Amino acid sequence: MKTNKKFTGRAIKRDFKKNYVVYLMALPALIYFFLFAYLPMSGLVMAFQDYKPKLGMFKSPGVGFLHFQKFFNDPFFFRLLRNTLAISFWELVVAFPLTIIFALLLNELRSKVFKRTVQTISYMPYFISMVVVSGMIIDFCKSQGVLTQVVKLFTGNEQNILSIPGYWRTLYIGSGIWQGIGFGSIIYVAALSGIDEQLYEAAVIDGAGKWKQTLHVTLPGISTTILIMLILKIGNMMSVGYEKTILLYNAQIYETADIIASYVYRKGLLEFNYSYSCAVSLFNSVINFALLIAANHISKKVTETSLF
Amino acid sequence: MREYKSVPRTIFNIFNIFVFVCVILLCILPVWHVVCASFSDAGWVLSQSGIIWRIKGFSLKGYELVFQNRDIVSGYLNTFFYVITATALGMVLTVMTAYATSRKDAIWGNAIMFFITFTMMFNGGMIAYYIIITKGLNMFDSRLALILPVCLSAYNLIIVRTAMKGIPESLIESAQLDGAGHVRVLVSIVLPLMKATLATVILYYVVAHWNSWFQASIFLRDRSKFPLQLILKEILITGNVTTTITGGTSAKASDYSGDLILYKQTVKYCTIVVSTLPIFIFYPFIQKYFESGVLIGAIKG
């Protein structure tokens, strides 16, 4: 650290005298994050205990890594890991590129008014609550629902879609795209508008057509944004949003729908296995953290773009 | 200009417009279906399969039932209370902290920021959080659980902080030379210069609090404290018919028994409209600002 010089005793004293008002302004936020983010981290102790609410965290007996062993030998361990990663994988492979393509195509629209209209309307679903979106999905998936009727056209099957494991991932990813594609594209549209117009003019003079321009000017122009978003996505591979899952899944489709977070919720908050679910949750957080660090590190090495 | 006319180009343009017309339809149709069904005759809605394109047999009976439902009315009021208090508190904290950490001469600024951003990368998880909030901080079944632990978002803080860093230092220094303290500088110099960012962040907070249900579902047991989304969850997801029509007053359920089956579906559509309308009214006022807001957050986020 080259900045260490400013942390000498005298400098600290002088800085505090001069800026104490500034630090006073940050104090409530520090207390906030201490109470609601760092204090819960201390609760992870439960993962290594046989936590009893009556005894509390200080008196509950310790059990070492027992809960972790139990989880690794859990018959559902593989299924949970597979489902969690599968959802992330398909989101990465389908939703992520589609959002970029959406932004690229939007950028090609010549009519300003039409472009604005598309943007305004495609952002809307993002602001609809997850409860309402899930309620609509349930409605569209019951046997006379819109989606079921579409499926019926192809397969002749009129069964409720939410009871068929094979459709869950498509439904999850598809509804996610519906809700998020417009809003997710904002960041790319902004990056696209930041590309220097002269680069396109130079490309045209060199005889590049539209396709070549896209390949050699547009994509390199937004590659930093794409990479940063990719790092974030990979760093969040293990933290699939659980709200939609908890709202929509049922025992019939656990086979594909049950993910680590929903399992933690069920075991911990519905069945009160606090210690066990806390261990599962810790396992999840640690892998997630490692993935984020790794993705960031690789990106830094390969492309000199990184989050931190 | 990079525009030039050719046949493949024209074909592409037409194809592109076609794609976006489809996108618009896909975004609007589900919402259109819900709105039309909510105003239509309940019997007709039940007999339909597939998309409902139009209103048939205009009826407001569904809405009447929704507004007779005590849970929905109290949920509405509770949500307004949670949204207003949490957003106000959150904005004050966000702005203060963003200002403090964007002062270049304060040597602990980056350390404070690290303390905050680390919580975005690692957290205690759902169970530890639940135990600490309920057992450690004693907020079980308390309205505070829906305000205090969720009012400040590290992500929104970064957006505001980045915008503040873009304000020329000379403006702040000259105000300080005139004798203005930090609070004065923040309120009369900095904040008026970043209205777009503030509007964006307020929108984010309001939408997040309006739509939040999970926090309430794990911490609250007393129905009179439930926010709207939790009531909605019972009606739309759990499909509790009695709750849907009568608002939990089971004594009255028999009076409605004829209507129960008939109106169950219509009432669902009406509650969706009633609960989502405020956000859709609020959003266009702020929309013109928030693209710039998202971009600012993206640079550093």
Image (tube, helix red, strand yellow):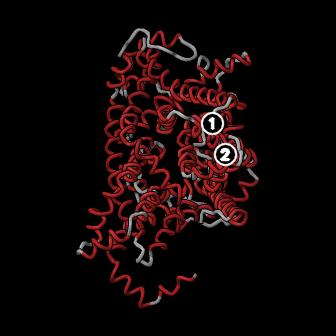
Mark 1, Cα crowd under 10 Å, few <14 / some 14-19 / many 20+, is: few
Residue B4 got which mark?
A: 1
Chain assignment, label 1: B
Element assignment for label 1: loop
- Image quarter in which the C terminus of chain A is found: bottom right
Instruction: Name the residue rendered at 53%, 66% in the picture.
Output: A42
Up-down: is A303 above or below B218? below
Residue A204 is labelled as 2
Chain identity of mark 2: A
Q: Mark 2: which amino acid?
A: Val
- Tell which of A228 and A260 is nearer to you: A228
Q: CA distance from mark 1 to mark 2?
A: 10 Å
- Nearest the viewer among B265 and A4 is A4
Q: Amino acid at mark 1?
A: Tyr
Marks 1,2: beta carbons within 8 A: yes
| Picture layout, residue A28 above or below residue B82 | below
Q: Which mark is residue A111?
A: none
Query: Which SS class for mark 2?
Result: helix
- Identify the residue at image location x=49%, y=62%: A37
Q: Residue furthest left?
A: B179
Toward the bottom, the furthest residue is: A10
Question: Residue A228 appears at what percent x and percent y?
Answer: 62, 56
Q: Nearer the viewer, residue A132 or A225?
A: A225
Q: Is residue A168 above or below residue B158?
A: above
x and y, in percent, of residue B44 in the image:
48, 9
Q: Is residue A224 left or right of residue B88?
A: right
Q: Is residue B141 visible?
A: no
Q: Callout 2 environment at 10 Å: few (<14), some (14 to 19), or many (20+)?
A: some
